[in-house]
Image (tube, rainbow, N blue to C red):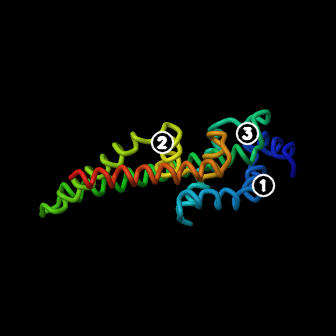
């Protein structure tokens, strides 16, 4: 199938043609699964993400436009966003569970550990301020938003080697900044 066939399939899908949905599933489910897996690092979670993407397709959430690129690229974009949303929901759920456990803890060390974690988190945020804007953006995309180096290169329009170099430089700056801060204690 070429791009024209994908456009026809998509149009049939919008008309609620179940056979078109099955054809899209057969053609793209493995690609979407492997892409989602790279973001969520779990087979069960990747399957959940793919199902969510297919439900979005069926419900008509988002509109594909052939003049903006390939159908597969659009699907991967939806998959990436859905996977990141999945991770955010999991993090929120985990944070809520941790917060509840801390509230119900009988011992002080749990609260002390939480305070220490928060202080360390604030130190890392503070240390990131020494980074150049482009390094801070790349670190944010890579570590906090789960983007691959290739995705970052495409988003910021830089060669992948440059992205890798900026990540390495930024990490060195952060390491040095955090080490200097510890010596000041």
**Left or right: 55, with 138 as reference point:** right
Q: Which residue is mark 2?
A: 136
| Picture layout, residue 43 above or below residue 27 | below
Instruction: Tell me, yes or no, if residue 85 can be seen here.
Output: no
Q: What secondary structure is marked by label 1?
A: helix
- Mark 3 or mark 1, which has the lower sequence index? 3
- Local crowd size for mark 3, using a 10 Å CA cut-off: few (<14), some (14–19), many (≥20): some
Q: Foreground: 180 or 1?
A: 180
Q: Find residue 23 and name its label.
A: 1
Disc 3 versus disc 1: distance between alpha carbons?
Answer: 13 Å
Q: What secondary structure is marked by label 3?
A: helix
- Mark 2 or mark 1, which has the lower sequence index? 1
Q: Foreground: 59 or 74?
A: 74
Q: What secondary structure is marked by label 2?
A: helix
| Picture layout, residue 37 above or below residue 120 | below
- Nearer the viewer's eye, disc 2 or disc 1? 2
Q: Residue at x 40, y 41 (%)?
A: 130
Disc 3 versus disc 2: distance between alpha carbons?
Answer: 40 Å
Instruction: Tell me, yes or no, if residue 163 can be seen here.
Output: yes
> Where residue 173 appears, x then y in whole percent?
43, 49
Disc 2 versus disc 1: distance between alpha carbons?
Answer: 42 Å
Q: Residue at x 55, y 48 (%)?
A: 166
Q: Which residue is mark 3?
A: 14
**Left or right: 138, with 89 as reference point:** right
| Picture layout, residue 170 above or below residue 101 | above
> Where residue 152 appears, x then y in whole percent?
60, 46
**Left or right: 86, with 76 as reference point:** left
Q: Foreground: 89 or 58?
A: 89
| Picture layout, residue 79 above or below residue 107 | above
């Amino acid at each position: 199938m070429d791009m024209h066939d994908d456009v026809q399939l998509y149009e049939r899908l919008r008309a609620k043609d179940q056979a078109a949905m099955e054809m899209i599933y057969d053609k793209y489910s493995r690609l979407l699964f492997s892409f989602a897996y790279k973001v969520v690092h779990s087979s069960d979670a990747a399957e959940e993400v793919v199902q969510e993407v297919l439900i979005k397709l069926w419900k008509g959430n988002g509109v594909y436009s052939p003049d903006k690129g390939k159908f597969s690229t659009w699907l991967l974009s939806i998959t990436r966003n859905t996977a990141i949303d999945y991770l955010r929901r999991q993090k929120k759920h985990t944070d809520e569970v941790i917060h509840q456990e801390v509230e119900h803890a009988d011992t002080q060390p749990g609260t002390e550990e939480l305070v220490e974690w928060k202080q360390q988190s604030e130190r890392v945020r503070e240390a990131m301020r020494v980074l150049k804007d482009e390094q801070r953006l790349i670190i944010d995309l890579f570590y906090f938003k789960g983007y691959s180096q290739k995705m970052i290169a495409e988003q910021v329009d830089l060669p992948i080697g440059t992205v890798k170099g900026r990540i390495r430089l930024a990490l060195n700056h952060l390491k040095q900044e955090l080490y200097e801060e510890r010596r000041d204690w």
